[in-house]
Image: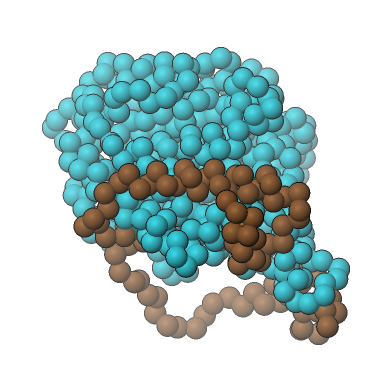
Chain colours: A cyan, B brown
């Protein structure tokens, strides 16, 4: 590990190594399309931090997070050409710890998708199998880390967008507690659900990056320090109970998993038992309703958040229109892809007068039930173990790709394990377990609010059992 | 879903749907709305709505000036400028 970190520290040291590094990344990136923009020279100067935990380390930033001087496309034509005038707080904090942005990574348009296939700039291929997707929406960040292009990358997780691609690519993906990392500079999709998090090859690197980013920020009034959280409803959010065998909750019954993911789930349970954890079967009846609740709330918030994109002040602008209203409509019709249009339409529909109580308000009430159910579960267990996704990386091309493919509706229904944490604001860490049908299968731990340290503790034990695998076609990371 | 319902929704969302988009998008919207109706199975009586999972009250920052002014680089992103005004196509 230390060797890897010290070799990464040198890549931006001199013009010569930087040139070789850029060459190395461009060759690999041509095969997978993880970076939309890559320029290791741009932010190299003048960012030597006093905190040395990340000194000199290059990192990638999902292209819906602002970095001054880099583009901010959100994978959408409507923002083509936009250059960010400022940097997100999370990015600035990583830079203060010594890390350096080298590029912007691909994503589903505005974070809306599970495969990066809704990106306007082509999808990111899975380094394990180029015919499969890297997952989404932070697929570019996960693939960049898995293919050895950067030691870590940041992304955003609204309903699983860090954990699912991390699981698909065989790396670690942290969705922190809602509010523990400032959203200032993250282009808003669903404000009450999303948070900036980390993708990395090791638990240690994941934790370092998270520690550098976390903490309240005056620019985001929903951000807070762990110490400010009053624990409402979730009781003790401290470290794994001392002096007892730690208890891990698992969900029984038929979870509708693919055979590969089911066997990875069983294998991770077996190893946890072997390591002395007590496995407790819990029941979460509300899991059944998590996806409709999640999509009702996410699309409602998206329809409001995306109303600002009107093609007037920046981005794509039509050449002519009959009147100002038409100008906006034409920009949005040409600028947004089908998935974004679908979600904006859905969100507008569920917020329409007459329908609000039936959909949006009801979803918010069931969100309370989901939260209550999880709070009750954490009185019995320290962590909950679940798959990150019911299948491993599926084939690109949607339903037309035949077997091992998922159409857009099936992809949404499959968000049930990940979006639970977003509805309740909980932290979760996905980790690689095994290789099934040639591609990685991953699980996730979900913890009470502000108890990321529990995730890292159990995550390290699992890392000893299942170290992050290396894709055969992308060996020998940067030395 | 009735085409008129979809039209009204698209109008509210400021999205001009092309003729050929109606069928596919309409089907996708309908499929999701039908899926949302699964929420009717849950008894929500006595449950308060959750707007934010962990934040129970407003949190305000001290009202002091000192923000970085990014108006110049923001204006540089405008498609067309005249002095510090954004020019839009002639629409009248």
**A209 shown above or below B60:** above
In this rendering, position of residue A84 left or right of residue A346: right
Q: Quadrant of residue A443?
A: top left
**A377 shown above or below A465:** below
In this rendering, position of residue A113 left or right of residue A122: left
Task: From the top left corner, tell me how far across and down residue A296 is, in percent.
Answer: 46, 52
**B32 shown above or below A276:** below
Pick the front one: A215 or A46: A215
Task: From the top left corner, tell me how far across and down residue A329 is, in percent.
Answer: 72, 66
Counting the numbered discs, the total is 0
- Asked if one can make out residue A117 in the rendered structure from this viewpoint, the answer is yes
Task: From the top left corner, tell me how far across and down residue A117 is, in percent.
Answer: 67, 39
In this rendering, position of residue A101 left or right of residue A184: right
| Quadrant location, the C terminus of chain B | bottom right
Pick the front one: A205 or A104: A104
Say which residue appears at 42% left-offset and 37% top-offset: A416
- Asked if one can make out residue A424 in the rendered structure from this viewpoint, the answer is no
Q: Quadrant of residue A282?
A: top left
Say which residue appears at 78% left-offset and 77% top-offset: A323
Q: Farthest residue to the left: give it.
A: A243
**A332 shown above or below A292:** below
In this rendering, position of residue A243 left or right of residue A232: left
Task: From the top left corner, tell me how far across and down residue A49 is, in percent.
Answer: 53, 55
Say which residue appears at 23% left-offset and 26% top-offset: A281
Pick the front one: A370 or A69: A370
């Amino acid at each position: 590990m230390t060797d890897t970190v010290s070799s990464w520290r040198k890549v931006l040291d001199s013009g010569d190594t930087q040139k070789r590094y850029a060459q190395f990344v461009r060759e690999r990136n041509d095969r997978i399309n993880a970076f939309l923009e890559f320029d290791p020279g741009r932010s190299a100067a003048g960012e030597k931090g006093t905190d040395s935990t990340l000194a000199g380390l290059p990192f990638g930033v999902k292209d819906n997070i602002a970095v001054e001087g880099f583009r901010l496309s959100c994978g959408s034509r409507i923002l083509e050409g936009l250059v960010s005038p400022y940097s997100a707080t999370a990015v600035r904090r990583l830079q203060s710890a010594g890390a350096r942005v080298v590029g912007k990574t691909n994503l589903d348009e505005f974070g809306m998708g599970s495969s990066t296939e809704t990106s306007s700039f082509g999808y990111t291929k899975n380094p394990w199998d180029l015919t499969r997707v890297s997952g989404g929406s932070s697929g570019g960040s996960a693939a960049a880390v898995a293919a050895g292009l950067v030691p870590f990358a940041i992304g955003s997780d609204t309903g699983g967008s860090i954990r699912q691609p991390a699981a698909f690519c065989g790396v670690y993906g942290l969705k922190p507690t809602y509010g523990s990392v400032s959203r200032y500079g993250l282009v808003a999709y669903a404000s009450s659900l999303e948070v900036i998090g980390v993708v990395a090859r090791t638990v240690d690197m994941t934790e370092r990056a998270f520690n550098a980013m976390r903490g309240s920020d005056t620019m985001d009034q929903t951000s807070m320090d762990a110490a400010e959280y009053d624990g409402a409803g979730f009781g003790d959010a401290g470290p794994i109970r001392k002096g007892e065998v730690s208890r891990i909750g698992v969900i029984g019954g038929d979870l509708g998993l693919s055979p590969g993911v089911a066997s990875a789930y069983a294998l991770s349970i077996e190893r946890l038992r072997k390591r002395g954890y007590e496995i407790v079967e819990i029941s979460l009846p509300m899991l059944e309703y998590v996806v409709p609740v999640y999509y009702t709330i996410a699309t409602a918030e998206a329809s409001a958040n995306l109303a600002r994109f009107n093609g007037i002040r920046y981005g794509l602008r039509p050449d002519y229109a009959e009147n100002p209203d038409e100008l906006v409509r034409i920009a949005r019709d040409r600028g947004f892809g089908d998935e974004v249009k679908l979600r904006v339409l859905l969100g507008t529909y569920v917020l329409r007068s007459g329908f609000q109580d039936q959909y949006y308000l009801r979803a918010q009430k069931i969100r309370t039930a989901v939260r209550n159910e999880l709070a009750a579960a954490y009185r019995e267990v320290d962590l909950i173990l679940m798959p990150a996704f019911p299948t491993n990386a599926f084939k690109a091309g949607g339903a037309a790709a035949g077997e091992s493919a998922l159409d857009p509706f099936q992809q949404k229904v499959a968000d049930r394990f990940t979006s639970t944490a977003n509805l309740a604001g909980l932290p979760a860490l996905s980790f690689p377990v095994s290789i099934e049908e040639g591609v990685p299968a991953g699980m996730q731990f979900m913890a009470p609010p502000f108890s990321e340290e529990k995730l890292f503790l159990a995550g390290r034990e699992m890392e000893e059992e299942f170290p992050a695998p290396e894709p055969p076609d992308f060996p020998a990371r940067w030395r | 879903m009735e085409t008129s319902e979809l039209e009204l929704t698209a109008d509210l969302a400021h999205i001009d749907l092309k003729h050929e988009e109606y069928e596919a998008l309409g089907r996708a919207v309908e499929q999701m709305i039908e899926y949302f109706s699964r929420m009717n199975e849950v008894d929500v009586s006595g449950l308060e709505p959750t707007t934010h999972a962990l934040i129970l009250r407003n949190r305000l920052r001290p009202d002091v000036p000192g923000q970085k002014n990014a108006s110049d680089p923001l204006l540089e992103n405008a498609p067309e400028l005249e002095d510090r005004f954004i020019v839009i196509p002639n629409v009248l």
